[in-house]
Image (spheres, rainbow, N blue to C red):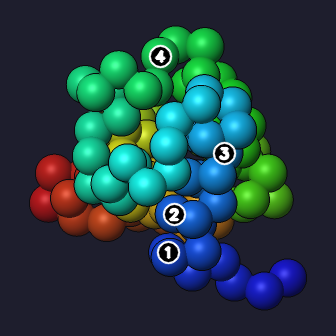
Amino acid sequence: MEELTEEGFINRARTFFCEVAGVESASLDADADLIESGILDSLLLISFLAFIEKLRGSPLDITRENLPAISSLRGAYALVRLRKPDDELCGSCNGA
């Protein structure tokens, strides 16, 4: 399986939000907070998690430490790259 780049993930995520939520892909900044902006609600969160798991090819182990990563496209990419439950996310996601 070819490794998914950050740019590739962000483009796919923008397409996902366009198709599922009707959000214009050009309006989705990679660092924007999807929760605070009202784009990501509780129902869409479940779909977005399933989307991330599909791209990863394995289930996510959501923890209190990595949950904030889902709030932005760039942060969600860190979850796609997270391969094992004991892998660490980027420093900005775990408070380092």
Between the residue at mark 2 and the residue at mark 1, the CA separation in whole angstroms equals 6 Å
Q: Amino acid at mark 2?
A: Ile
Between the residue at mark 4 and the residue at mark 1, the CA separation in whole angstroms equals 23 Å
Q: Amino acid at mark 4?
A: Asp
Query: Residue 36: which quarter of the image?
Result: top left
For label 2, the SS is: helix
Between the residue at mark 3 and the residue at mark 1, the CA separation in whole angstroms equals 15 Å
Camera-side residue: 7 or 45? Answer: 7
| Residue identifier under label 1 | 6
| Residue identifier under label 4 | 41
Label 1: few (<14), some (14–19) or many (≥20) C-alpha neighbours in 10 Å:
some
Between the residue at mark 4 and the residue at mark 3, the CA separation in whole angstroms equals 14 Å
- Image location of residue 7, percent across then percent down: 50, 76
Q: Residue furthest left?
A: 96
For label 1, the SS is: helix
Q: Residue furthest bottom?
A: 2
Q: Residue furthest right?
A: 1
The residue located at (34%, 26%) in the rendering is 35
Label 3: few (<14), some (14–19) or many (≥20) C-alpha neighbours in 10 Å:
some
| Residue identifier under label 2 | 10
